[in-house]
Image (cartoon, helix red, strand yellow):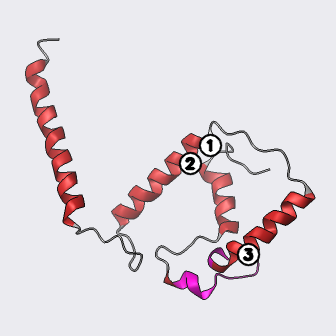
Amino acid sequence: MARLAPYAAPFVAAGVLGLLAAVLFVESGVFNVGATSPHTRLTYWLTHTTMERSVRRAARAIAAPPRFTADQAAEGFRLYDQNCVVCHGAPGVGPGPTAAGFMPPPPYLIEAAHVWRQQSCSGSCATA
């Protein structure tokens, strides 16, 4: 163990410098967090990949719920129509004008549900 100590110093120094660089970057304010322009490819990849991996990991511990009753489905449709359609659209209904100002644009959830079920979760987060 003592023989590894001299080799650890460069790694510790690199870690401290990396942390310092991250803090300076955050404190500088140069990263545009506004939703008025698209992300760079790197930022999009980083945030999207992080989100996918997080959902996939969390979904492993979640069992699919039992089938919804007709009343529960009707309530879900009512809530979606009341709170979500304006940004996410619905079958045959595009997003409202409010969604045009969002960057990134809100996903069309009918397609998103299919993509998550088929590709990202490998069946572990399929809906009932």
Mark 3, residues whose alpha carbon is within 10 Å: few (<14), some, or many (≥20)?
Answer: few
Residue drawn at x 76%, y 75% as measured from the top left:
91
Q: Is residue 79 above or below residue 10?
A: below
Left or right? Give the position of 15 relative to 102: left
Q: Is residue 67 above or below residue 48?
A: above
Q: Which residue position is annotated with label 3?
A: 82
Q: Amino acid at mark 2?
A: Val
* Magenta segment includes 91: yes
Q: Calculate the distance from the C-alpha at mark 3 to the C-alpha at mark 2.
A: 26 Å
Left or right? Give the position of 98 relative to 34: right
Residue 1: quarter of image: top left
Q: Is residue 85 above or below residue 67?
A: below
Mark 1, residues whose alpha carbon is within 10 Å: few (<14), some, or many (≥20)?
Answer: some
Left or right? Give the position of 21 relative to 84: left
Q: Which residue position is annotated with label 1?
A: 59
Q: Amino acid at mark 1?
A: Ala
Start-end of magenta stretch: 87-100
The residue at the far right in this view is: 70
Count of marks placed on residues: 3
Q: Position of residue 41 (x, y in %)?
A: 36, 66
Instruction: Report helix, strand or loop for mark 1.
Output: helix
- Disc 3, disc 1: CB below 8 Å? no
Of marks 3 and 2, which one's residue comes earlier in the chain?
2
